[in-house]
């Protein structure tokens, strides 16, 4: 069956006793043994809860992986994935452009634990080829399309280079979503999502996910990190995530259409960064790698520095000025303000997360504010 069908029905998860077509939220943290002192199902809630299993099975099917793990945030998933791949002395390639908190964390982690973290422009295959140290590089990690300029990295090409050098490839696919790109099918070893964004989709649950291609030693380590350190999603959050994921395909398809329409209409008015526009530097890669759309995220550069960008934000009436992305309501954010003085993000850049409002209302609001 197609992923749309599997996710809409949450794998046809119907309760055998009651016929519930929605899995119940089970809050128990522990489970009674039977008169033979045997467990009937889970033992303890740090390891499992019936709803986690359903969520993880849906995620594994959506990404075409063998297994998935849920986490209480995208950061918990990303840090578990990266740590599972490396030991002190190893070399890691990290992206030049990408989600700020991950880029910051990997630098601090590397400095503290003796892991050589090298920042590379992963859209440049020659740069990646030059940075790989066969036998030493254990991981190439990147995000595509990447915050906040939506740089697109060629997953298949990077996998070929990295695997030849003995390195694994981990992809933060939060903004592509499994609707548009399935990195495991292009050769990646691990896929990570901030499920807080498109998977949850309603700005009401913080969650993360990892999906693996192989049930290997790195996956065993990722499972141990979650078991030993306890970054476990709560059952209510797991329920909300599953509920949100059922509408993933319709949301993302609509958000892609609206984002494309807005990107095209804004093009005459200011600089627009969107992988769907032929002017985007990696448009050709995006067209090959992303199916059915180019995502719901775009950025604009207003010109005139931070003052002008913030003045535009103040005039908006439809777009909500807030961080995060991937929800049903459109958000605008001035990334340089959030990232602080060492931010590499252009001062006049506004990041736009397109929701489910009418494209005309979203465009008219921006056009009036830019005028
Ligand atoms: C939000 C985000 C993260 C971090 O996820 P949290 O759920 O906020 O911990 C990581 N990567 C990307 C691309 C994100 O957008």
Image: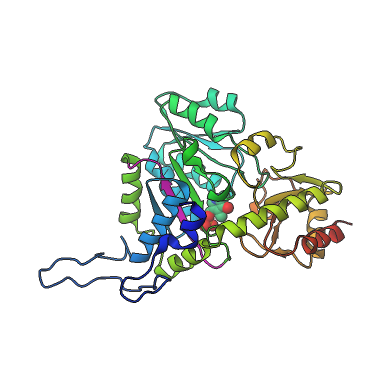
Extreme residue toward the bottom, this view: 18
Is 342 part of what is drawn in magenta? no
The location of residue 134, given as percent across then percent down, is 43, 23
Provide residue 293's location: percent of width, then percent of height. 65, 47
- For residue 286, what is the image quadrant? top right
In the image, farthest residue toward the right: 371
Name above or below for residue 339 compared with residue 361: above
Q: Is residue 324 visible?
A: no
x 63%, y 47%: residue: 292
Residue at the outermost left position? 36
Figure label count: 0
Q: Position of residue 108 (x, y in %)?
A: 49, 44
Q: Magenta stretch?
A: 204-215
Which residue sits at x=62%, y=41%?
97
Residue 209 within the magenta-colored segment of the rendering: yes
Q: Residue at x 48, y 39 (%)?
A: 185
Please give left or right for residue 286 compared with residue 6 in the image: right
* Frontmost residue, 73 versus 273: 273
The relative height of residue 81 versus residue 57 in the rendered view (above or below) is above
* Residue 235, picture quadrant: bottom left
Q: Please, which colouring scheme is shown?
A: rainbow
Drawn side of residue 91 relative to residue 283, left or right: left
Q: Is residue 115 above or below residue 172?
A: above
Q: Is residue 209 something that shows in the picture?
A: yes
Q: Is residue 219 above or below residue 281?
A: below
Where the C terminus falls, by quadrant? bottom right
């Amino acid at each position: 069956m197609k992923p749309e069908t599997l996710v809409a029905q949450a794998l046809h998860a119907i309760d055998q006793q009651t016929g519930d077509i929605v899995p119940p939220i089970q809050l128990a943290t522990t489970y009674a043994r039977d008169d033979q002192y045997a467990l009937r199902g889970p033992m303890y809630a740090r390891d499992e809860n019936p709803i986690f299993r359903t969520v993880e099975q849906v995620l594994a099917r959506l990404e075409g992986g063998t297994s998935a793990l849920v986490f209480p945030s995208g950061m918990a998933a990303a840090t578990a994935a990266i740590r599972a791949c490396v030991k002190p002395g190893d070399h890691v390639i990290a992206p030049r452009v990408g989600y700020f908190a991950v880029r910051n964390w990997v630098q601090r982690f590397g400095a503290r634990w003796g892991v050589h973290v090298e920042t590379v422009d992963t859209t440049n295959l020659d740069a990646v080829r030059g940075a790989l140290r066969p036998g030493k590089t254990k991981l190439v990690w990147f995000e595509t399309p990447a915050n906040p300029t939506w740089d697109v990295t060629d997953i298949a090409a990077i996998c070929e280079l990295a695997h030849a050098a003995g390195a694994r490839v981990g992809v933060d696919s939060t903004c592509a979503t499994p609707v548009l790109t399935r990195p495991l099918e292009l050769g990646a070893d691990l896929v990570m999502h901030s499920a807080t964004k498109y998977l949850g989709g309603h700005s009401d649950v913080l969650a993360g996910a990892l999906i693996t291609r192989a049930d290997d030693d790195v996956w065993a380590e990722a499972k141990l990190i979650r078991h030993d350190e306890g970054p476990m999603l709560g059952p209510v959050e797991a329920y909300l995530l599953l509920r949100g994921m059922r509408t993933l395909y319709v949301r993302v398809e609509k958000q892609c259409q609206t984002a494309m329409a807005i990107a095209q209409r804004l093009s005459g008015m200011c600089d627009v960064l969107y992988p769907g526009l032929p002017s985007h530097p990696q448009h050709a890669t995006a067209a090959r790698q992303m199916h059915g759309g180019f995502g719901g995220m775009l950025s604009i550069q207003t010109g005139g520095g931070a003052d002008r960008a913030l003045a535009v934000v103040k005039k908006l009436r439809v777009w909500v000025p807030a961080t995060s992305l991937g929800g049903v309501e459109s958000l605008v954010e001035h990334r340089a303000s959030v990232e602080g003085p060492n931010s590499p993000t252009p001062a006049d850049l506004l990041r736009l997360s397109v929701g489910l409002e009418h494209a005309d209302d979203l465009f008219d609001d921006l056009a009036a504010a830019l005028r």
